[in-house]
Structures are given as structure tokens and as C-alpha cells.
Amino acid sequence: MYYVGVDLGATNVRAVVGDETATVLGADARGTPRGPNGIAVTEAVLSVVRGACTDAGVDPRDVVAAGIGSIGPLDLAAGVVQGPANLPDVVERIPLTGPVSQLLDTDEVYLHNDTNAGVIGERFHAESNPDDMVYLTISSGIGAGVAVDGSVLSGWDGNAGEVGHMTIDPNGFMTCGCGHDGHWEAYCSGNNIPKYARELHAEDPIDTSLPIADPDFSAVDVFAAAGEDTFADHVIAQVAHWNAMGIANVIHAYAPLVVSLGGAVALNNPERVLDPVREKLADMVFINVPEIRLTALGDEVVVKGALASALTGGTGDRSRVDGYVD
């Protein structure tokens, strides 16, 4: 039997075809269209699914089920992305479930936001297949996929897990891209770290080699200067403080056994992102402190999670897969 996993991101669209052991047999990818409308993005999704099937030597009609991990916000009932924040305004509505179902001739199509697909992949591929875990992405934004008692929390509309919009700073020093003050994402996401650095420097304009005034100043610059620039170290220490606070909130809310981190900021800077959080949590968490680890699936966590969703009926529970051998 064959299964499909799709990762629809704001930058790239990827698809894989796998068998009943989640072995990837074929793959395809392309850039995410910026328009002229949402149908163009739908067509890109269908194109990479066809390409992955061709790469695997599989007829799309022989695929049993598909999982899709997507940017949001989602309308699960309609099976679409509605008003994606990180694509141009002309991309208002991206149909997904219906077109993929029609291409593959199967009703078994599971749509998730990307972090929920991430936690499904983490759970499926984890050595112990834990029922309680969180996948947290720290990238251009911050979000979480959460599994509690073996159930992935999606919310009535598919948009649960927007933990980056938790308020961690009641003083609201930074304004989030969503327009609200004090959100975790406003301080610690890849898009906002340089904005936060500029605000900190305006408060205390110490000497720094960082190109603060350069329009292309980025989080990469901050982490690259770590250990050699006092101000860069200060920014990273402040980001670590907010990350620890946000992760402590997630732990108190969901009591996971494992918190697995991914996303470009975490994957590219594990010592600067994970290690300070591990050091701080014991003093911030009232309940059991979970294992804090970097995802072993790298930037394939969403597409492999989508494939695992197809195999497990949207759960990541390996016991639901006939013939799967640990």
C-alpha cells in the first residue's frame, strides 16, 4: 500500500510517497506560488504529489491515504487554507482536501496545521511513541503541535497550538506581527529577533558590530556574532529568557513527556536556543520537567509527519499501522 505526505509552506511545497513502514519511495518539491490566486497554490500541491508518485513509480490512484501539513489559518470543515498570513493578499483561499482527494481517488485525506503534522511525525518516529508530547517550531514564527493522552489537539477549526501568541510580557515592550503586544513570537521568532535587537539597542546603545541600521539585518547576524559581540550575547540571553518562559507555559498547560524543537532558529542554533532553556526550566516549572530535545527529523519533520498522519489516521500512533515493525 502507498501513502502520500504533503508539506505546504509559505516558501516551498513538498510531497513524498511512502509505504506501510513510512519508508519514503519518492519525493518532489517546488517553490510556493505567490499568486495570482489560491488555485495556483492548489495546483502546485497537486503537481508535487504527481511528481512524487512518478518518482516512486506509483499510480496516484493506488495511494490509500494522504496527510497534509499546511500553513494556516485552516478551515478544517471546508478543507482549505483561508487568508494565509505569509502569502500575498491575492492568495485568499487555497483548496486542499477536495482536490487531493480527487487526484488520489481516496476519501482518506487528513489536513493539519504544520505544527500538528510535526508532532504526529515526532510521535510516530520517536523510540517510545509517547502519548504526551509537544513539537515546537521556532522559525519565522512560533507554534506548537500538541499530543495529550494520544490525541492530537487540533481545535474545532484546526488552529490550536498558536502558542507564539501567548502573552509573555504584560508590559508589551514588543508588538507582534499579528498586531498585539507582548506575544512570545514578537521577541523570539526569526522574523522578530532583529526588531527586538533594534529596540534593545535604542534603549541601551552600546558598541556593537551588528549591522543594526541595515535593512537586511537578520537573526542570522545576531547568532553569528555570539561569543564575540557583547550586545549580540545580550540579545541572545534575552531571547533565551522569553523562550524559557514560553516553554514553561506550554509545559504547565499540557504536561508533556517530551518537548521537541524544530524550525530554522532552533535547528541552526541548538546550543544558543536549547541549552539555556534546559538550564532555566527547573527554576520555572512547578510540575515535572520534560525532556527538551532537538527534532531528529530536521526540516523534513512536517512532510514526514504528514506521511505518518496518512498511515495512522491522523494520530501518529504506530499501533494503528498493520505490519509496522519498531
Image: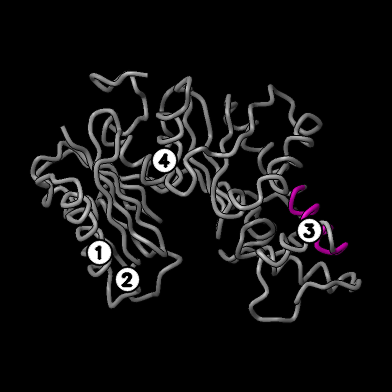
Position above or below: 32 against 123 = below
Question: Pointers 2 and 1 in contact (CB under 8 A)?
Answer: yes
Question: Pointers 4 and 1 in contact (CB under 8 A)?
Answer: no
Question: Disc 3 to disc 2, how far (Cα)?
Answer: 35 Å
According to the picture, the residue beneath numbered tag 1 turns out to be: 44
Q: Residues within 10 Å of mark 4 (few under 14, many from 20)?
A: few
Give coordinates of residue 180: x percent, y percent.
Answer: 62, 62
Q: Earlier in the sequence, mark 2 or mark 1?
A: 2
Question: Disc 3 to disc 1, how far (Cα)?
Answer: 39 Å
Magenta span has 233?
yes
According to the picture, the residue beneath numbered tag 2 turns out to be: 33
Magenta span has 36?
no
Q: Which quadrant of the figure contains the N terminus?
A: top left
Colouring scheme, one of rainbow, by chain, secondary structure, one colour: one colour
Question: Disc 2 to disc 1, how far (Cα)?
Answer: 7 Å
* Disc 4 residue type (three-letter): Gly
* 307, 245: nearer the viewer: 307
Question: For the residue labelled by badge 4, is the local secondary structure a helix, a strand or a loop?
Answer: loop
Q: Residue, x 56% and y 64% (percent of image)?
A: 178
Describe residue 183's horizontal placement relative to residue 159 as left or right. right
* Disc 2 residue type (three-letter): Pro
* Disc 3 residue type (three-letter): Ala
Q: Residue, x 68% and y 42% (percent of image)?
A: 274
Residue 226: image tag: 3
Q: What span is colored magenta in the figure?
A: 229-240
Q: Earlier in the sequence, mark 3 or mark 2?
A: 2
Q: Earlier in the sequence, mark 3 or mark 1?
A: 1
